[in-house]
Image (cartoon, rainbow, N blue to C red):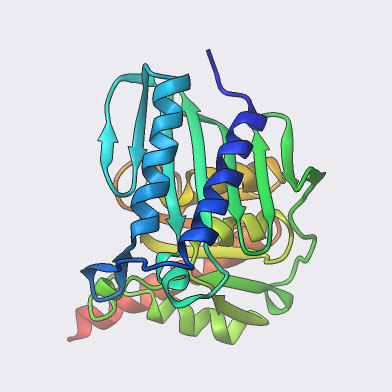
C-alpha cells in the first residue's frame, strides 16, 4: 500500500501544532555542535511521525534526522526532518518547517513541507503537480540572473575548508539581484517551487533536508541536480543546485567558474 498525499499533509499539520505548542515550554536545547541544535520538540515530532509510519506502513524503511535509519523494506523509503531549521525555531524565528517525503524504488513519489508559523503547506505528487495550501504552484519565469533572487546556506564546519560556500556566495552576490540565507533548506526549495526565489544551492546537506523539496521543485517545473551535474541526492552528503529552467544553467556556469578559480589558486600556492 502506498501513501496518499492527504494523509501525509495531516501528519505535517499535526506536527506543526506540536512545534508551536512546545515552543511555549522549555525546549531543552542540546548542542550537536556550535551551530547544530536539537530540541525536545525535534525528538517528540520525529517520534510522532515514526509512530504514524509504524501504524500505517509498518514494513517501510525510514531515514529520520534524529534517530537515523529504520531499515525494513528498502523499496519503500521515507525521509523525515521533524524540524528543518531548528536553530531558527529555538530562537523564535518563523522560518522552520516539517519535511516528509516518500520514495518507491528510489523515485520520490510524495513530498510535503509545512511551515507552521505561516500555516503554509507545500505538497507534491509525482506526475500530478505541486501545491501551496491546495493551489497549484509553478517556478518563476524570470530568465536573467541579474534579476534573480537566490537562496543559499552555510555549513559551519566547512567555513574554513576548501569546501566552503563563501566563494560561491560572493560571486552570486555580484551577479544576481540578491542572495538570501533563510535557514531551512526544505523551505528554500519550496520557495523555488512557488516562484518566490529563482534558485537555491547549498553544500553538504542531508537527504532528509531536501527530499520533499526536490519533488516540489520538479513538479513545479524546475530543475534539481547535484551542484556540478547528476548525483544521488537521496544518500550521503548532498551538494544541491535547484532553479527554474532559465536560471539553472546560468547558476551552473557561475559555480563552474568559481570551482576553476579555486583550483587555480590552490595550484599557485
Task: Kindly tell me whether residue 261 is visible in this rendering.
Answer: yes
Question: In the rendered image, which quarter is residue 196 located in?
Answer: bottom right
Q: Residue at x 40, y 81 (%)?
A: 167
Total marks shown come to: 0
Residue closer to the observer: 118 or 175: 118
Vertical relation: 4 (above or below) 101 = above
Residue closer to the observer: 80 or 234: 80
Q: Residue furthest left?
A: 269
Q: Position of residue 162 (x, y in %)?
A: 25, 74
Quarter occupied by the C terminus: bottom left
Residue closer to the observer: 67 or 230: 67
Q: Residue at x 48, y 29 (%)?
A: 103
Task: Kindly tell me whether residue 214 is visible in this rendering.
Answer: no
Q: Position of residue 146 (x, y in %)?
A: 70, 79
Question: In the rendered image, which quarter is residue 240 located in?
Answer: bottom left
Q: Residue at x 27, y 36 (%)?
A: 69
Q: Residue at x 53, y 44 (%)?
A: 212
Report the side of 81 relative to 159 (left or right).
Answer: right
Q: Position of residue 13 (x, y in %)?
A: 61, 46
Report the side of 85 relative to 215 (left or right).
Answer: left
Report the side of 21 relative to 129 (left or right).
Answer: left
Vertical relation: 46 (above or below) 199 = above
Vertical relation: 18 (above or below) 141 = above
Q: Residue furthest front?
A: 25
Q: Position of residue 117 (x, y in %)?
A: 62, 64
Residue closer to the observer: 51 or 100: 51
Amino acid at each position: 500500500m502506498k501513501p496518499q498525499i492527504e494523509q501525509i499533509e495531516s501528519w505535517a499539520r499535526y506536527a506543526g501544532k506540536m512545534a508551536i505548542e512546545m515552543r511555549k515550554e522549555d525546549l531543552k536545547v542540546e548542542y550537536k555542535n556550535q551551530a547544530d541544535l536539537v530540541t525536545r520538540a525535534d525528538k517528540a515530532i520525529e517520534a510522532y511521525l515514526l509512530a504514524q509510519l509504524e501504524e500505517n506502513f509498518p514494513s517501510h524503511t525510514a531515514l529520520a534526522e534524529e534517530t537515523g535509519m529504520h531499515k525494513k523494506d528498502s523499496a519503500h523509503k521515507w525521509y523525515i526532518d521533524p524540524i528543518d531549521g531548528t536553530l531558527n525555531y529555538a530562537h523564535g524565528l518563523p522560518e522552520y518547517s516539517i519535511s516528509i517525503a516518500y520514495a518507491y524504488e528510489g523515485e520520490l513519489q510524495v513530498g510535503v513541507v509545512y511551515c507552521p508559523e505561516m500555516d503554509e503547506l507545500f505538497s507534491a505528487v509525482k506526475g500530478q503537480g505541486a501545491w501551496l495550501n491546495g493551489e497549484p504552484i509553478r517556478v518563476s519565469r524570470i530568465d536573467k540572473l541579474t534579476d534573480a533572487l537566490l537562496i543559499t546556506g552555510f555549513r559551519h564546519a566547512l567555513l574554513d575548508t576548501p569546501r566552503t560556500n563563501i566563494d560561491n556566495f560572493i560571486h552570486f552576490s555580484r551577479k544576481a539581484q540578491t542572495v538570501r540565507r533563510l535557514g531551512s533548506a526544505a523551505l528554500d526549495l519550496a520557495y523555488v517551487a512557488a516562484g518566490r526565489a529563482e534558485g537555491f544551492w547549498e553544500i553538504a546537506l542531508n537527504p532528509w533536508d531536501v527530499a520533499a523539496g526536490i519533488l516540489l521543485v520538479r513538479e513545479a517545473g524546475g530543475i534539481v541536480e547535484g551542484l556540478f551535474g547528476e548525483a544521488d541526492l537521496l544518500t550521503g552528503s548532498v551538494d544541491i543546485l535547484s532553479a527554474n529552467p532559465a536560471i539553472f544553467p546560468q547558476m551552473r556556469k557561475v559555480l563552474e567558474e568559481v570551482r576553476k578559480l579555486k583550483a587555480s589558486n590552490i595550484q599557485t600556492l
